[in-house]
Amino acid sequence: MKEAIRMVLEFIYDPEFPDTSHFRSGRGCHSALRRIKEEWGTSRWFLEFDIFQCFHTIDRHRLISIFKEEIDDPKFFYSIQKVFSAGRLVGGEKGPYSVPHSVLLSALLGNIYLHKLDQEIG
């Protein structure tokens, strides 16, 4: 089920991501650096951030509201709720945070969440 969800989300959201988004097919650090060099020319300083435990702090409810902006399919939301409800326990209880532990799906969910943040602050 995780792979089917990943495929649907990737089809919808991947075209919206900038080339600098991480964990994407055919893109990575080298393609991001190449794009920066081409577009930013003579910049001498760049910052790289490692968002510590990003996947453990994503608000699933906020992520679902982001999905609802693009997706209108009750079956999809039923499936994603099933995947999310099988998530990790936080302090012995299920919390509203943490996305499923699937490398490709978690990375895609993180990209969707952070891309929305970029749009809102940009």
Image: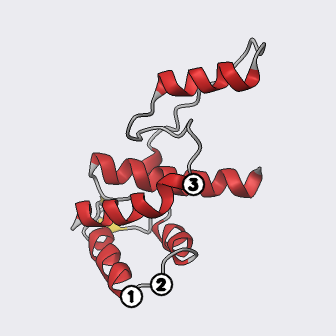
Residue flagged by tag 1: what amino acid is it? Answer: Pro
Q: Are marks 2 and 1 in contact (CB under 8 Å)?
A: no
- Which of the colour schemes (rainbow, by chain, secondary structure, one colour) is used? secondary structure
Q: Quadrant of the N terminus?
A: bottom left
Can residue 98 be seen in this snapshot? Answer: no
Q: Nearer the viewer, residue 53 or 21?
A: 21
**Mark pair 2, 3: CA separation:** 18 Å
**Mark pair 1, 3: CA separation:** 23 Å
Left or right side of 98 for 45: right
Residue that appears at 59% across and 43% down: 18
Disc sitting over residue 16 in the figure: 3
Q: Nearer the viewer, residue 85 or 25?
A: 25
Q: Nearer the viewer, residue 41 or 94?
A: 41
Occupied quadrant, residue 73: bottom left
Residue that appears at 75% across and 52% down: 121
Residue flagged by tag 2: what amino acid is it? Answer: Asp
Residue flagged by tag 3: what amino acid is it? Answer: Glu
Instruction: Determine crowd level at label 2: few under 14, some 14-19, many 20+ residues with C-alpha closer than 10 A.
Output: few
Occupied quadrant, residue 65: bottom right
Occupied quadrant, residue 37: top right
Left or right side of 29 for 35: right
Mark 1 or mark 3, earlier in chain: 3
Left or right side of 24 for 40: right
Location of residue 91 in the rendering, given as x and y in whole percent from the top left corner:
34, 59
Which residue position holds label 1?
74
Residue that appears at 78% across and 13% down: 42
Disc sitting over residue 33 in the figure: none
Q: Nearer the viewer, mark 1 or mark 3?
A: 3
Q: Is residue 33 above or below residue 10?
A: above
Q: Is residue 114 above or below residue 87?
A: above
Disc sitting over residue 72 in the figure: 2
